[in-house]
Amino acid sequence: MCGIAGLTTFHSPQSDQATLQTMGQAIYHRGPDAGGEYFDNNVGLSHRRLAIIDLSEAGVQPMHSSDEQYVIAFNGEIYNFLTLREELIEKGYQFKTHTDTEVILALYQFEGVELLKRITGMFAFALWDKSKESLFIARDRIGKKPLYYYQHNNDIAFASELKSLLTLDYIPKDIRLDAVYDFFAYQYIPDPKTIYQNVHKLEPGHYLTIDKKGITKKKYWNISFAKTSTASEAELKAELQARAKVCTEQRMVSDVPLGAFLSGGVDSSGVVALMAKISAEKQAKPITTCSIGFDEEKFDETKFAAMVAEQYKTDHHKLIVQENVEDNLEHIVSFFDEPFADPSLVPTYFVSQLAREKVTVAIAGDGGDEVFAGYEKYAVDHVENKLRNKIPKWIRKGAFPSLSKLAASININACQRASSLLNSLSVDPAMGFYISNSFIKDSTWQALVNDETQAQLNGYHPSKQTIDHYNQCDGNDHLSRILYTDMKTYLPGGILVKVDRMSMANSLEVRAPILDSSIIEFACTVPSQLKFNISDGKIEKKYLLKEAFKDDLSDDILYRKKMGFSVPLASWLRNELKTITEERLLNRTEGLSQFFKKEQIAKLWFEHKNVEKDNSTILWSMLMFQMWWDNYMTKKSSYS
């Protein structure tokens, strides 16, 4: 796990080592073990190393191939590298190291860009082909590892994080207004946008090639629901169990201490169970597990984590998050170099910090909810869509919007919920999914946004992100379409960004077996009724995954109500974070006040502070936006 950065200079002044060192230093936290640069007349590469496989100096990057024709800066892990290495040795390649990095170099020598079809893992890398004078940049299939780039005059600058690009003074920091709206709708900015007009994210499953002729972007992998398996439930369960074990065992290969995140939920508990059994088979020592809790019981899952830890006799560690939120928030938020507002970033930082005290690699249960339909929002959407399908379209398009407006005009919670439901029922399924899952209502946005910003948005609405992906899915049923949408938006833009930034802030590598492409491809063939099972009027979310873990986990873990990685946000804003929230939202002349009406910001704050309404979600998003602005737009930070 590392950080990469670099640039091409086909049509620009040649780079120098100092520039590359500065880009690398901005992401030092991603790789504190070593750093290095490579540059010639047309390209510069920078690398920060967190040593995981082959700890010797031979693994330092940028790395050259054995024939010196190719140079790579690589971030990530290739889980099938040992198998590929044996194949390449048989073909005559002579390895200088035991790293997965050199396996990519060797594969490129034999297969070129087609190597992407062979490797399994999480990655973002830049590979310079000296003979072709061509740079090849690729990102993994689901988007575990980040890659940002700036394109100008057929040259490119790229990095694992935006803060590295911001060290280049020629990159403009012009705000992209539709990305601002996206942020308040989703709590993150979806690919390929960033908060800046001229900087982009390379989408998951894509690669770039850059040479003197220009820049080309291509997709090499996609999620497909086109084929549905006809295998029995028992056969599908057995296949999932086998795949999950293989993918977990692959992620337990490490030359440094390794452990696991354990929340006490189905996904992380199932992964820990697999790890414990694999360790027992190899007669290895007990695995290390870490969990985070809160002093408010309804947000605390540590008792469930403790049950699993006791069952599998893990070396278990826990931390209760209390008064240290305010003291650490500025530092935590600084690692997000564009606005990001998922509140679980706070416990994710602390569990990563706790884990890093014990291990260098942590295995997590990320992906189970998006891949196997585990979120409560899927149940809500199912009910809404079922109702929607029973109502004639002319009624939905006519009467329901009027009823929705009437309900919204009455300021009580029940009618607000009715307004949301009626509004969702009045539109098509894709828009309904957006409405049910957006973090800001249209009415709230319209009240907040100032006239100048609204005019410049020129009618743009963030639902486009959801609707476009929903309609691009090749599956036939509604559940497949919303899972596809979340795997293209929420998973890479929200969940994986949060985990990457908060783990890398602590120089910790996190691996997620359930997000292996082989499991995702398998899950897409599983009939929807075996993910989201409805029997006797009862909805069982994540059905097949729970069945796969049924022999390993108790019913108390498998079938308890899902809590998620929630935080006591409303309380935090009224108590621990009251001072910082008031100061940032009400006393700043730049940032929020350039896009929103100051009196509306104040109104939302005073309603929440005085316990008249729970405005915690929009207030938290505004606080995160303002803190980002203060870090990256109004001062010379340590990163820029």
Image (tube, grey):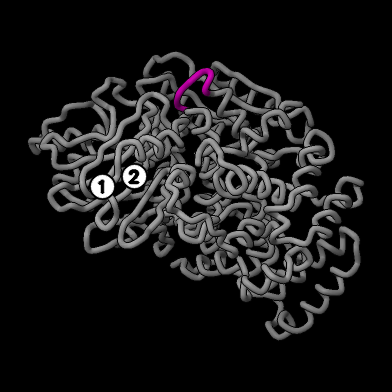
Looking at the picture, how far across and down is residue 77, in whole percent? 35, 36
Q: Is the C-beta separation of discs 1 and 2 under 8 Å?
A: yes
| Label 2: how many Cα within 10 Å (few below 14, some 14–19, many 20+) | many
Does residue 280 sit above or below 462 in this rendering? above
Q: Which residue is mark 2?
A: 6
Left or right: residue 150 versus residue 370 is left
Q: Which residues are magenta?
A: 356-361
Q: What secondary structure do most residues of the magenta stretch adopt?
A: loop
Q: Residue at x 14, y 42 (%)?
A: 69
Look at label 1 and name its amino acid.
Answer: Val
**Which quadrant would the N terminus be assigned to in this image?**
top left
Look at label 2 and name its amino acid.
Answer: Gly
Asked whether 632 or 276 is in front, the reply is 632
Asked whether 218 or 479 is in front, the reply is 218
Query: Which of the labelled discs sits on residue 5, or is there none?
Result: none
Q: Which residue is mark 1?
A: 43
SS at mark 1 in the image: strand
Looking at the picture, how far across and down is residue 559, in whole percent? 66, 39
For marks 1 and 2 on the same chain, the one whose residue lies earlier in the sequence: 2
Residue 242 seen from this side? no
Q: Which quadrant of the structure image shows residue 402?
A: bottom right
